[in-house]
Image: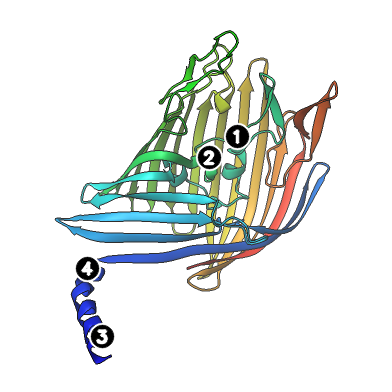
């Protein structure tokens, strides 16, 4: 027994330097609140997760490789506190790479620049005007070539649309200048072919190839004392490529913030062309807000924004405003209360309180869902967030 203990002690001493060169940090956010409100005919009441910040559990690690290099990785899963679901199939980030004085090059599921560079007085909460107006414009489904499809939000957005799979990213910071670039190979990694009719031999034609659904993004931000200014550009290829119907999606944003001491002013303007790859469906979105400190631990947040969806034959608009208060109970725990109201033109169902939806049929055939449009979304929230 004594020999075994001595052997284990020696093994521990030998391996100790290797372990000392690496470290792993467990981190996360636990955020939940009570929400109640309405969106047209739809009432909302209950506990909801991640209202101020998305709830998550993550592992972040580094290992010193020598010569100024280190290996880095992040594995981050989202979860919902109200029902306990999410962990295991709700990846927010998952990447590995190498970092040094040049910055970091990483591979995996990662944030596009449109997630990182946000100039939002309501700190990219679910009830902020920027988060709401850059979300999915219609809660139902639309018919595309006989298939019921759900519309998605913009990719310059503090949500899942700005998390890109199968990607290579670069992130660097140099004397106040932050640069972030990403290229996503998305879902198509091999060719796909049309169905073969074994009776006639027809079919078997290549219908897609790697690169057809790729996406790329670039973001630049300069920070100097109280000032931050930045710009973001996203380009997403249209895999369907139906002439006159679909097109590549392009988005850009410019924004900034300035801390005057008595308040911080923040705002941004963004555009999207061929949103959801629908040719000539364009979006203009702007928002502005202020953060006003109250005492040593509190902040009042006020923000207003508008979005206009242009398409052939007309346009629809939505405006959204939020009033909120956050209070730091400790270094890691924040209590919050807020109210958002979003007004929609006919054709839009934007809002943190979800619009009423119903299954639809046409000539006895299910065609997806329809949603109530042109109504007001009103939501009051009160909750607590803990970070660790």
| Nearer mark to the viewer, of 4 and 1 | 4
Of residue 215 and residue 180, the one placed in the foreground of this image is 215
* Outermost residue toward the right in this view: 364
Question: Does residue 309 appear to the left or right of 354 in the view shown?
Answer: left
* Alpha carbon separation for disc pair 4 and 1: 46 Å
Q: Is residue 121 above or below residue 241?
A: below
Cα–Cα span, label 4 and label 2: 39 Å
Could you give the CA–CA distance between mark 3 and mark 1, rounded to whole angstroms? 61 Å
Mark toward the start of the polypeptide (3 vs 1): 3
Residue neighbourhood size for the residue with mark 3, other residues' Cα within 10 Å, grouped as few (<14), some (14–19), many (≥20) = few
Q: Nearer the viewer, mark 4 or mark 2?
A: 4
| Residue mark closest to the camera, 3 vs 1 | 3
SS class of the residue under badge 4?
Answer: helix
- Mark in the foreground, 4 or 3: 3
Q: Which residue is mark 1?
A: 152
Separation of disc 2 and disc 1 at Cα?
8 Å
The percent position of residue 82, horizontal first and vertical second, equals: 67, 61
Q: Which residue is mark 4?
A: 18
The percent position of residue 333, horizontal first and vertical second, equals 54, 70
Mark sitting on residue 314: none
The residue closer to the viewer here, 220 or 68, is 68
Please give the residue where the numbered disc 2 appears in the rendered image: 161
């Amino acid at each position: 027994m004594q020999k075994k203990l001595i052997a284990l002690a020696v093994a521990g001493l030998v391996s100790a330097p290797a372990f000392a060169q690496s470290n792993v940090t467990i981190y996360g956010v636990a955020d939940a609140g009570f929400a109640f409100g309405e969106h047209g005919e739809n009432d909302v009441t209950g506990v909801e997760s991640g209202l101020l910040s998305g709830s998550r559990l993550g592992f972040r690690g580094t290992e010193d490789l020598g010569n100024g290099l280190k290996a880095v990785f992040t594995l981050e899963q989202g979860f919902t506190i109200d029902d306990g679901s999410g962990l295991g199939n709700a990846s927010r980030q998952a990447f590995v790479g190498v970092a040094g004085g040049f910055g970091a090059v990483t591979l995996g599921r990662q944030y596009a620049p449109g997630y990182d560079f946000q100039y939002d007085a309501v700190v990219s909460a679910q009830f902020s005007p920027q988060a709401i107006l850059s979300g999915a414009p219609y809660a139902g489904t639309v018919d595309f070539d006989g298939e019921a499809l759900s519309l998605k939000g913009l990719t310059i957005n503090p949500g899942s649309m700005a998390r890109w799979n199968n990607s290579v990213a670069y992130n660097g910071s140099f004397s106040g200048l932050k640069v972030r670039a990403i290229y996503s190979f998305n879902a198509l990694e091999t060719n796909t072919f049309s169905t073969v009719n074994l009776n006639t031999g027809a079919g078997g034609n290549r219908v897609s190839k790697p690169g057809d659904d790729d996406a790329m993004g670039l973001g630049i931000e300069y920070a100097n004392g109280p000032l931050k200014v930045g710009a973001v550009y996203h380009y997403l290829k249209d895999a369907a490529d139906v002439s006159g119907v679909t097109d590549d999606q392009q988005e850009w944003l410019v924004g900034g913030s300035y801390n005057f001491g008595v308040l911080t002013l923040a705002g941004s303007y963004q555009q999207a062309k061929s949103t959801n790859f629908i040719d000539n469906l364009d979006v203009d979105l702007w928002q502005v807000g202020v953060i006003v400190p109250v005492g040593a631990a509190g902040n009042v947040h006020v923000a207003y924004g508008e979005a206009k969806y242009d398409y052939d034959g007309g346009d629809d608009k939505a405006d959204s405003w939020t009033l909120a208060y956050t209070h730091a109970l400790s270094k890691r725990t924040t209590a919050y209360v807020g109210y958002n109201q979003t007004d929609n033109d006919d054709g839009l169902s934007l809002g943190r309180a979800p619009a009423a939806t119903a299954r639809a049929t046409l000539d006895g055939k299910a065609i997806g869902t329809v949603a109530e449009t042109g109504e007001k979304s009103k939501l009051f929230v009160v909750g607590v967030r803990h970070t660790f």
